[in-house]
Amino acid sequence: MRIFFTFFIIILLSTTSNSQIKMSLDDAVRIALQKNTALKQIDNNISTFESSKRASFGNFLPTVSASGSWDWTRNENAASVMSIAGFNFDIPESVTESRSFSLGVNSNIVLFDGLSNYASLSQSENNLESAILFFERTKQEIVFRTISLYYSIVEIEQLLNVRTEDVKQQQKTFETIEERNRLGAVTLADVYQQKVQLGNAELDVIRTQNNLESAKSNLLFFLGLDVLEEYEFSKDLSSDEKLRIKTDAEKDFRIISDLVSQALTYRKDFIGKQLDLESAYDGITIARSGHFPRLLGSASFGSSANTFDNLLESKRYSAGFTLSIPIFSGFRVSNQVQFAEVRAINTELDLKDLERKIKQEIQQSLLDLQAVKKALIVSENNVIAAEENLKIEREKYALGAGKLLDVLIANTFYTNAQTNFINTQFNYVKLSEQLKYNLGILNHTKYE
């Protein structure tokens, strides 16, 4: 039964990959950038900000409108009798028609509106730039999340290899102990003890396999793909990634103040929030413009005639200025100013909170990365030491000079050391990408 289980796991892992679609990390990131719904919505919203910018620029241009009319009137009067001084006069029926044509062109331009038009243009430009930066930051977030989800799969794949190899070794040990028990070299207690150890190893394989399927499902759902489709992912870190781990682990990180300064320079969300603050200040200017006079310029041209041929013979020109001075608006303008000022204050508070959050994220990422950097060396040495200790305990037990319990303990230490080393490797890779994301330098353009 145990042999059947072992071969079942091996066959399952080997045969399922035959019908699977291969997906590399680069493929996953490209799919995420193409199919992510939130990213598409942000991209669609950018067009509305571009339209608002054009509309704000249009406030500086004159408005032009043209009009034309044609009227036709027909009067039909029936025959009648009109009495004058006792005499009756017959008035015959009559028909009269009249036509009129008119043409006009009007133009208006805002000459001064309390600088509202300038503030509106500045606000629309800031809003557009902020939306573009938010779009870029969202791309970085998608890339980071995709990398994290993908590496989780690769990590569990390696853990599954460790668990599967452990089952093989436990099976071999179990068969050896069974044979030695038949020869009377070991007790039946050793057989049952090893049987329990083998069963636990098999359960670990099943749990790890379930975790792997869950990790695959999480990635496919995030990519917007069918979670029931079969995909084959990488089962190990690439040679470049392994080299980067060893190379980066030997480097010393810069002081945190330098990293914070870099983040405040490159973080798209921080720059966008600064633009939001400028936009809020523009909103104050727009609201305050209601207290200032408004000056409009106008010009018009018109012509009218009773026949179309004479339409342009009689012309009418006009030009003028209109100055409107606000005296009292029922506190409406003051209310708008107050709302704009509060929005600016809140935006400024959000900007300060974001700056503190960036500092905290970088500090935490740096501390975690430095801790994992030290753990890499320790965990790798632990694997070597645990492997050697397991060999010694197995040899002692084979010679009858050791106990099975010591072999089981040594095997557990070795399996845990391998697991810790794999977890530490992938934690380092993920934390490295997280630090880049927190610094705002995670490159997403290479995937587009």
Image (cartoon, rainbow, N blue to C red):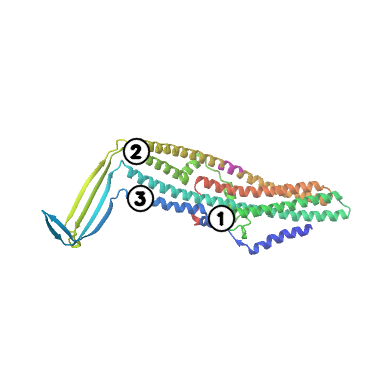
Q: What kind of residue is marked 2?
A: Arg
Above or below 402: residue 80: below
User: Residue under circle 2?
Assistant: 288
Residue 209 locus on image (x, y percent): 68, 54
* Residue beneath disc 3: 55
x, y percent for residue 372: 61, 44
Closer to the N terminus: mark 3 or mark 2? 3
Label 3 secondary element: helix
Residue interval drawn in magenta: 365-371
Residue lying at the far bottom of the rendered structure? 18
**Extreme residue in the front direction:** 86
**Residue 176: which disc?**
none
Amino acid type shown at disc 1: Leu
Residues marked 1 and 2 touching at CB (< 8 Å)? no
Badges 1 and 3: C-beta atoms under 8 Å apart?
A: no
Query: Which residue is at the front of the view, 284 or 92?
Result: 92
Residue, x 43% and y 47% (percent of image)? 130
Cα gap from disc 1 to disc 2, whole angstroms = 47 Å
Residue at coordinates 50% horizontally, 56% vertically from top-left? 446
What main secondary structure does the magenta stretch of the protein show?
A: helix
Q: Secondary structure at mark 1?
A: helix
Q: Quadrant of the N terminus?
A: bottom right
**Which residue position holds label 1?**
223
Side (left or right) of 120 relative to 385: left
Residue plotted at (65% across, 50% down) = 422
**Label 1 or label 3, whichever comes before in sequence order:** 3
Q: Which sits in the foreground, 222 or 295? A: 295
Residue 116 locus on image (x, y percent): 33, 43
